[in-house]
């Protein structure tokens, strides 16, 4: 209970001391006499927001002090003990100083406390109720509920249908908001993935292409040396003392020997014949290679340009060609999912219109 109130330099009050007794206390006076100012001063003791406007004109600070009986205020005593505030007596001195700068200091039993701690203690000791605060009818948030009660069940079915429709509508709005909150990030990701997919698709990646390019580029770059070596090898197999011809002659001699000494050199003859056919195949292969080995600068430039493109893609994505082919397929699936997601969002918006 508030026992006494002391006000100094607060608003239009220079100094005022009020003693309160048990029972009801009534403050009466004409308009502008200062009744509301006294209530505002009490409000400062329970932690209401301070303002420099509360300091009397020309003064540095305003002081409000109240003495409270806490003999039976168990909740307040418990809060005071929690905050470590001394309570040797059965009364409490609460003081609030408000400076012209707008700042304020709160004290309980001469111990400085925060505004938040002041509120915790004082909410168990004092409360302020304004005019009409207990009149529910004047509060807009209760109007619909009061109207529904007044109908006395006459519109219960319509109300139930409305509540069901409203809940559906509210649920879909929340669902749409959740989807739209991710829209921007998804659209940015979709743009990036579409760019990557188009870039990889345009590259027409193939497994093992880099290895084949390396072979082809090396072949063209060394076409002169290759041509000399191919021609020399081919000439070895086709000149007057060509090895296949000599092997053919050797095979004929071994055949004659085999007729006289059966099976003595049969294995050797078989090996010679096999080697002869191997060299014959090699001769045709060398001939084909010679016809294909020409230095083509334009073709070399195309191959090197293709190699640069593939290497740039490897560096850009940090993946080899086989991984890039897999990645291309993966982002194609993700693009399809996101585009379907956009379609779902559009359908959800449409459903909201028809609810």
Image (cartoon, grey):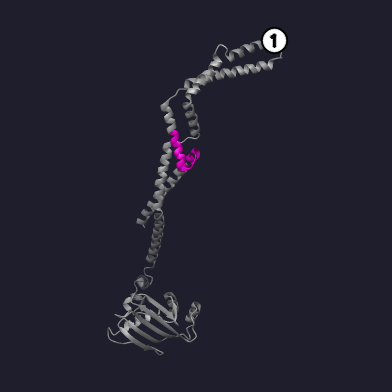
Q: Which residue bears the numbered disc 1?
A: 259
Residue 312 position (above or below residue 145): above
Residue 184 position (above or below residue 319): below
Q: Quarter-wise, where is residue 146 in the image?
A: bottom left
In which quadrant of the rendered image does the C terminus lie?
A: bottom left
Q: Secondary structure at mark 1?
A: helix
In which quadrant of the rendered image does the N terminus lie?
A: bottom left
Where is residue 10 shown, x and y percent of the image?
A: 33, 82
Where is residue 257 shown, x and y percent of the image?
A: 69, 10
Magenta span main SS: helix
Looking at this view, is 129 or 321 the one in front?
A: 321
Tell me if 33 is positioned left or right of 239 in this view: left
Could you tell me if residue 47 is visible in this image? Answer: no
Q: Residue at x 66, y 15 (%)?
A: 269
Looking at this view, is 294 or 33 the one in front?
A: 294
Residues rendered magenta in the picture: 306-328
Is 324 colored magenta in this rendering?
Answer: yes
As drawn, which residue projects farthest toward the left?
Answer: 31
Could you tell me if residue 276 is visible in this image? Answer: yes
Is 170 colored magenta in this rendering?
Answer: no
Where is residue 19 shown, x and y percent of the image?
A: 38, 89
**How many neighbours does mark 1 have within 10 angstroms: few (below 14), some (14-19), or many (20 or more)?**
few
Q: Quarter-wise, where is residue 152 in the image?
A: bottom left
């Amino acid at each position: 209970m508030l026992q006494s109130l002391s006000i100094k330099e607060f608003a239009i009050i220079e100094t005022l001391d009020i003693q309160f007794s048990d029972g009801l206390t009534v403050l009466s006076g004409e308009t502008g006499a200062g009744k509301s100012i006294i209530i505002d001063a009490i409000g400062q003791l329970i932690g209401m927001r301070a303002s420099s406007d509360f300091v009397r004109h020309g003064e540095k600070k305003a002081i409000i002090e109240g003495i409270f009986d806490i003999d039976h205020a168990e909740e307040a005593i418990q809060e005071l003990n929690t905050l470590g505030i001394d309570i040797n007596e059965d009364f409490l001195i609460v003081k609030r100083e408000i400076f012209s700068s707008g700042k304020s200091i709160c004290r309980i039993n001469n111990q400085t406390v925060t505004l938040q701690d002041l509120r915790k203690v004082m909410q168990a000791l004092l409360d302020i109720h304004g005019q009409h605060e207990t009149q529910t009818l004047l509060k807009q948030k209760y109007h619909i509920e009061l109207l529904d009660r007044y109908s006395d069940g006459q519109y219960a079915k319509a109300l139930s249908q409305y509540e069901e429709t409203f809940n559906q509508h509210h649920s879909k709005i929340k669902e749409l908001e959740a989807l739209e909150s991710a829209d921007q990030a998804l659209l940015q990701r979709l743009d990036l993935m579409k760019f990557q997919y188009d870039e990889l698709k345009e590259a027409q990646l193939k497994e093992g292409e880099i290895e084949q390019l390396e072979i082809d580029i090396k072949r063209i770059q060394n076409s002169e040396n290759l041509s000399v070596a191919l021609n020399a090898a081919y000439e070895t197999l086709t000149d007057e003392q060509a090895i296949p011809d000599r092997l053919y002659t050797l095979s004929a001699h071994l055949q004659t020997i085999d007729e006289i000494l059966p099976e003595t050199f049969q294995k050797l003859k078989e090996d010679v014949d096999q080697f002869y056919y191997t060299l014959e195949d090699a001769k045709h292969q060398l001939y084909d290679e010679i016809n294909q080995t020409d230095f083509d600068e334009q073709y070399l430039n195309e191959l090197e340009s293709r190699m640069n493109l593939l290497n740039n893609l490897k560096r850009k994505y940090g993946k080899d060609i086989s991984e890039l082919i897999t990645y291309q397929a993966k982002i194609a699936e993700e693009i399809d999912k996101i585009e379907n997601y956009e379609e779902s969002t559009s359908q959800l918006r449409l459903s909201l219109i028809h609810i």
